[in-house]
Amino acid sequence: MQERLSGFMTERLIARHDWVAVTVLLAIGFVTGSFVDYDLSLALYDPANLYGQVFAMYGMLPLAMTFAMAGALYFRCIDRTLGGARVALLAAMGVIMNVGALYACAHEPVLESADPQWAAFLVHVVAAAVTDLVVLRAVRGASRSAILRYACLCTFVLALEILLVNVILKNLWGRPRMRMISVTPDAAFQPWWVVGSDMKQTLMAAGVDKEEFRSFPSGHSASAACAMLFAALPAVKSCWLARRELFFWIPAAFMLVVCFSRIFAGAHFLTDVCAGAGITFGSFMLGVWLFYRNQVSMGQRVPEERPRGAHARAPRG
């Protein structure tokens, strides 16, 4: 039976008080860190701290999960009714995002570790696969356009985060990490507002790895903030809007926990983690406005009116 939509209304996808609260927290952290970055890190840095070690290995999980989820959703949008070019584009995006997921799974546990942690790699792979299965099951019944729009939102945020954090800012700033400063006599603290220094070239010539000069902004915190993309899932199925606070604050809590852990690990300063998380969170909110205007439409489906009688016939000529 054909149906039509009635009683349309709109509701905010991300509540104003939620995104304002996270923005204020990150801003306060960044301003505070501008004054106490070194002293705070000096007080908290503990390479043996279990909290810092665990999230050093698993803090980037949301990056792999988001890549995998977007890839699966692109494949989910493929349909026989589409033209060949569209099918090829969706398939290509699905492959690209899944390759990105595999790289994200291997980056910290394997590629960035002197002693590869294969168990952690498997945890990343399993988490990404489970995310695929859960999300694909959850979006059943959603329209293809809603699924595709959400996949594009994920792609937009991931691309912007990687470009700004890993490609541009880390290389431009060249800020030394606390863990390197603590064991290198010639290393000195560099505040966030100082962009680049001769110290980097001098210490690298002496054998210090270039990775130790990629403190600002925090890539782990930026990757952890990719969890915020789960807050946009209610845009795919508006029936989830009633739980939008959970969709928002559970990822936000994970992001903040990972941010703080990086100070214990000596990998980043407070301004680093606030900047990294802020870039991804800002990219997410920008994407929400671009793709949804921060609003989702809702309406109640009602049956079309039918002629009286169970078997109404067309009037004769």
Image (cartoon, rainbow, N blue to C red):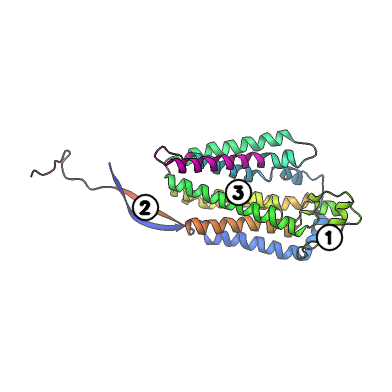
Specify which label sits upstream in the sequence, 2 or 1.
1
Residue in the image at 13% along x and 43% along y: 314
Q: Nearer the viewer, mark 1 or mark 3?
A: 1
Q: Nearer the viewer, mark 2 or mark 1?
A: 1
Q: CA distance from mark 2 to mark 1?
A: 56 Å
Q: Main secondary structure of the magenta part?
A: helix
For the C terminus, give its image quadrant: top left
**Viewer-proximal residue among 89 and 74:** 89
- On residue 299, the disc is 2
Residue at the image point whose x is 57% and y is 59% from the top? 19
Magenta-span inclusion, residue 281: no
Q: Considering depth in this image, is 189 or 261 the residue closer to the camera?
A: 189
Q: Amino acid at mark 3?
A: Ala
Q: Which residue is mark 3?
A: 227
Q: Which mark is residue 275?
A: none
Element assignment for label 3: helix
Labels 1 and 3 touching (C-beta < 8 A):
no
Q: Please state the horizontal and vertical placement of residue 312, each as a whole percent of the image.
A: 15, 41
Magenta highlight range = 76-104
Query: Residue 207 location in percent, x, y?
Result: 88, 49
Name the foreground residue: 24 vs 132.
132
